[in-house]
Image: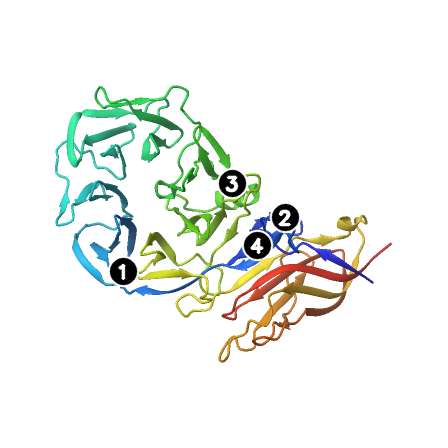
Amino acid sequence: MAYLPVRLAGGTHRHTDLSLSAQRTINFFPQHQEAGNEKSPFVLESFYGLKSFASGTGLDRGMFEHLGVLYKLSGTTLYSVSSAGALTSLGTIPGDSRAVFDGLGSSVVITADGVAYEWDGATLTAGTDPDFETPNTVTVINNQAIYDGGGTNGRFVVSDVGLPLDLNALNYGTAESKADALIRPFALGTVVYMFGSKTIEQWWNNGTGNPPFQRIEDGTIAVGLGAQNSIANDDEFIYFFGDDNQVYLLNSTVPTPLFPLTIVREIRKFSVKSDAIGWTMQIDGQWFYVLKFPTADRTFVYPRGIRRDVLGEVFELSSGVDGGRYLGNSYAFAFNKHLVADESGNILELDEDTYTENGEVIRRTRTMAPIHGGLFGKPGKEIEISTFRLIGATGKGLTSGQGSDPEVILQFSQDGENFSTEIRGDVGRLGVKTVIDFEIGQSFETWVFRITSTDPVYSNWHSAGIEAWIGT
């Protein structure tokens, strides 16, 4: 029998026909290696665990850092959070909808349940200007707040300079290149993107007229916004969930689809998609766009490639052991920490050296691409596999407790749906390096392997191979 290398790493790519592709990557990060001469071009890395930062109560409605201060809306209470994790109540914001935050000068502007608020460092004030039209979202550019009109007519309004709660009725405009509702204005750089239900318009501040903004000619994009709170940005691009169930990277007027069509088809079947929550975070120079569908109970992550010519592969985050959505609900970078709020108001810190979620088990799985005779020039032929070999970081066990004798679990399938009983492999106690061989001894036309780890230790798998005989 020959020893044949097979590709281990990759993202989620589940086809309707699972025998064609049942690939799924959960709580592993398929990381592309940059130099190009590594042992493997991709590696499965443990995604960061979570440790406690601050305890809270109440439904998470958003979190935001501004000028070195962390703000958190839990239930109906707005808090400031210190670097030690102490929460201080700043006032009340009624309702239960998710809030939108932005900074204007030294103030924080917040919209929630059709009302705008300003925290000026001393007082939380609700906007009572009669010219407000139930704003649901806010963005800030050139020291002015821009709100959606809260209706279906595409209207937006621009505040007075430096005064986010002061409006002039003449400063309403309409994003009307198409007859669709304005869902959210969003500023990046010198441009405000007016996200509608069917189109996106680009506007810029020309400094004259009422409002002092003008639509950019040829700046209309024929994609709408599918979820108000899915928009986020990194240092260059905007990410959002589109009205066509695709996820996009927006570079000026060019929307680039990011998700494979297999995931788009899955999302299309979700009963509720408009509640999607998105955020971006940069960890160790790598940007991630996280998109969570609370009702559908799924969380996807797109890792932006560090090299422009390499697209990231979408993977999933999940909390608990049943494959549901990630507990993270909001994100902020504050106090030189990556902070994630869970759905119940607690704040946790993402940490590369933590391998649990605040003490709870993280279940990491990778269902590989199918292995079949066509990969080796013999389509339709059965492959008899005697051994599956897994290569990666071993000898990472803990000194005591769970993880002191860590294991990795292998299962296999013919159809990508019905998997074998678990075969356990020894990952090695602390300092004990090992090669992990799983004895198989069966013959199928198509093989789908799945590896799983639950021990609270560092996991890094970069290569796999099979000892196999292929039919003639």
The answer to which of marks 1 and 3 sits earlier in the sequence is 1
Mark 4 or 3: the one toward you: 3
Rendered image: mark on residue 399:
none
Q: Secondary structure at mark 4?
A: strand
Looking at the rendered structure, the number of numbered marks drawn on it comes to 4
Amino acid type, label 1: Ser
Q: Secondary structure at mark 2?
A: loop
What whole-number distance in Å separates the C-alpha atoms at marks 4 and 2?
Answer: 25 Å
Q: Position of 88 compared to 423: left or right?
A: left
Quadrant placement of the N terminus: bottom right
Mark 1 or 3: the one toward you: 1
Amino acid type, label 4: Arg
Mark 4 or 1: the one toward you: 1
Q: Which residue carries the number 1 mark?
A: 83
The answer to which of marks 4 and 2 sits earlier in the sequence is 4
Indicate the position of residue 310 as horizontal and vertical percent values.
57, 42
Q: For label 1, count other residues whose C-alpha is less than 10 Å away and answer few (under 14), some (14-19) or many (20+).
A: some
Q: Residue at x 50, y 79 (%)?
A: 399
What whole-number distance in Å separates the C-alpha atoms at marks 4 and 3?
Answer: 16 Å
The answer to which of marks 4 and 1 sits earlier in the sequence is 4
Q: Which residue carries the number 3 mark?
A: 258
What whole-number distance in Å separates the C-alpha atoms at marks 3 and 2?
Answer: 23 Å
Q: Which residue carries the number 2 mark?
A: 36
Mark 4 or 2: the one toward you: 2
Q: For label 2, count other residues whose C-alpha is less than 10 Å away and answer few (under 14), some (14-19) or many (20+).
A: few
